[in-house]
Image: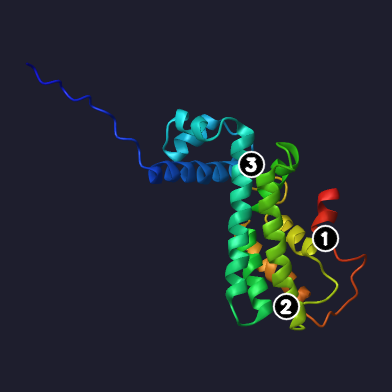
Amino acid sequence: MQTATPVQRKTPRPRADALRNRERIVAAAREMFVELGPDVPLDDIARRAGVGNATVYRNFPDRDALVREVVCSVMDRTSEAAERELMETGDAFEALARFLHAAVDERISALCPMVSSTFDQHHPDLKAARERCDQLVEQLMGRAKAAGQLRADVGIGDLMVTAVQLGRPPAGTDCFSVDRFVHRHLQLFLDGLRAPARSVLPGTAVTMEDLRKA
């Protein structure tokens, strides 16, 4: 009697590998969205990530899903930067300044147009990431105001619109050619945020809701 040959089964890929592939796709997409805009071919993103096209589509069934994941990941990284600074017990204004420098490096400006034009702004994932980020930045600002270091007439929208504007290169210039100026100009802005204020700002403090309605 012949012994049946055992059926050779493929060992399923460890979950860690799948997560690493997803992270590589998101990282590559973020880089290419910043460089080339939201319409970059998904095949090009797959090549940069070092994965097959099928892996991209298995993780993200359409472009909207990938763009949304990229935007949420940037917001999550920005939130993590805020959380790190909230854990510091030193100078509250310096913690806020370090956060803003980190936020500018996330290239939020390049992703903002995609939030408004590519997919549903009210998607639960996006809403949760946005609310978490807003709350953490408000805490950073509140701590600096309570310490008497941050002028009282600025809101979270004032900070974030500046981070966006500074990260956006002037028309006709390469996105990365102005990197060397961004942190210099951000520091000039930060000096203007310090209390006591040297001038009266026109209008009222800008909230994130103000920005989203604009």
Q: Quadrant of residue 201?
A: bottom right
Q: Which mark is residue 71?
A: none
Q: Is residue 17 above or below residue 167?
A: above
Whether residue 39 is visible, yes or no, is no
Q: Quadrant of residue 78?
A: bottom right
Q: Position of residue 5 (x, y in %)?
A: 15, 22
Q: Position of residue 33 (x, y in %)?
A: 60, 42
SS type, badge 2: helix
Which numbered disc flags the more N-terminal residue, 3 or 2? 3
Q: Is residue 26 above or below residue 104?
A: above
Residue at numbered disc 2: 144
Q: Position of residue 148 (x, y in %)?
A: 77, 83
Whether residue 200 is visible, yes or no, is yes
Query: What residue is at 45 percent from the left and 32 percent from the top?
Result: 55
Real-space Cα distance between discs 3 and 2?
Answer: 32 Å
Real-space Cα distance between discs 2 and 1?
Answer: 17 Å
Q: Which mark is residue 68?
A: 3
Residue contact between numbered discs 2 and 1, judged by CB atoms under 8 Å: no
SS type, badge 1: loop
Query: What residue is at 69 percent from the left and 77 percent from the top?
Result: 93
Real-space Cα distance between discs 3 and 1?
Answer: 23 Å
Q: Amino acid at mark 2?
A: Ala
Using residue 79 as the reference point, say whether residue 1 is left or right of it.
left
Which numbered disc flags the more N-terminal residue, 2 or 1? 2
Which numbered disc flags the more N-terminal residue, 3 or 1? 3
Using residue 31 as the reference point, say whether residue 5 is left or right of it.
left
Q: Amino acid at mark 3?
A: Arg
Residue at numbered disc 1: 207
Q: Position of residue 20 (x, y in %)?
A: 43, 45
